[in-house]
Image (tube, rainbow, N blue to C red):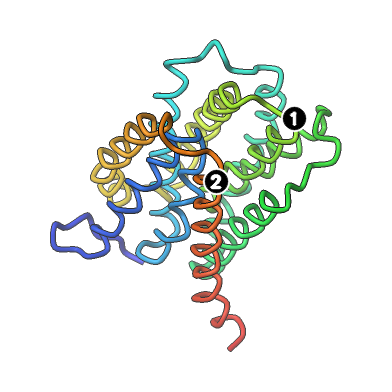
Amino acid sequence: MTVKGPSMMDAAFFAALLIAFVSGTVFGLVGFGFALVSVTPLLQFYDPPTVVALSISLTIVNSILVVASARDAVHHRTLLPMLPGAFVGLVVGARLLQALDSDAIKLMASCVVLLFTLALVARITLPGAHTKGAAVVIGTVSGLLATSTGLSGPPVVLLLTARKFAPHPFRVTTSAYFLCVNTVGFAILVIQGTIGQSQLSIVAALLPTALLGTITGRHLARYVSPAGFRHAIMLLLLLTSALGIATTLPNYLA
């Protein structure tokens, strides 16, 4: 599938601008969720390599903003054990992105978002979350999802939630992890030719809007009710993941 560069008359591009802004706002508010909110709806407009490129690139930039202002809060004893497995997962995920068709990636991404959201709603706790082995497994799964769907966050969020991280170190540690993993993942996808000039032109066009959303979210954080915001995000994730499954699954059942 050939991806055209952004056009000022392209309805898909205007929809992507809105998605980038909303996703950036969520990231600014809670320190994660950019890919969770953006990937499924963006897959309605762009092919998987373009969406993965967008998710990874914009997450890198947003993560730099968070880590640069609070790098002393990074919890290295949690971060470092996840990285070796994540780097292995990145290679496997990149191969999956090449091997699977668009509908398979779309269905995979939608199912990941739906299952993650249901796990949060049900307050499911990962067994053995405080062990080093859990960190290795979580890192591997996260890396695989990063380069196949752009969704590196769900496994890591579940791990840090189970470890009962306070909000600030949670936000900074996840951002540091995303920065490391997505930077390597981006390099892998460029080297294997999955990300090229057409994807990068769309990333460049959407980047300012995503950053504006992040800045907006950081300013809104002091005014928004955490409980009310959490409920709104859960509903949004359920709706977007259900939409992705509903528009893709019939292709496999026909």
In this view, the mark in front (2 or 1): 2
Which of the labelled discs sits on residue 163, or is there none? 1
Q: Position of residue 56 (x, y in %)?
A: 45, 41
Q: Position of residue 245 (x, y in %)?
A: 55, 71
Q: Position of residue 24 (x, y in %)?
A: 38, 41
Q: What residue does disc 2 label?
A: 230
Residue with the most extreme bottom position? 254
Residue in view at x 38 percent, y 40 percent: 25
Residue type, mark 2 in image? Arg
Helix, strand or loop at label 1? It is: loop
Q: Earlier in the sequence, mark 2 or mark 1?
A: 1
Q: Nearer the viewer, residue 67 or 89?
A: 67
Residue 73 versus residue 159 in the image, above or below = above
Q: Nearer the viewer, residue 162 or 68?
A: 162
Residue in view at x 65 percent, y 24 percent: 79
Q: Name the quarter where the N terminus is drawn.
A: bottom left
Q: Name the quarter where the C terminus is drawn.
A: bottom right
| Residue 177 location, quadrant | top right
Cα distance, mark 2 to mark 1? 19 Å
Q: Nearer the viewer, residue 170 or 186?
A: 170
Residue type, mark 1 in image? Arg
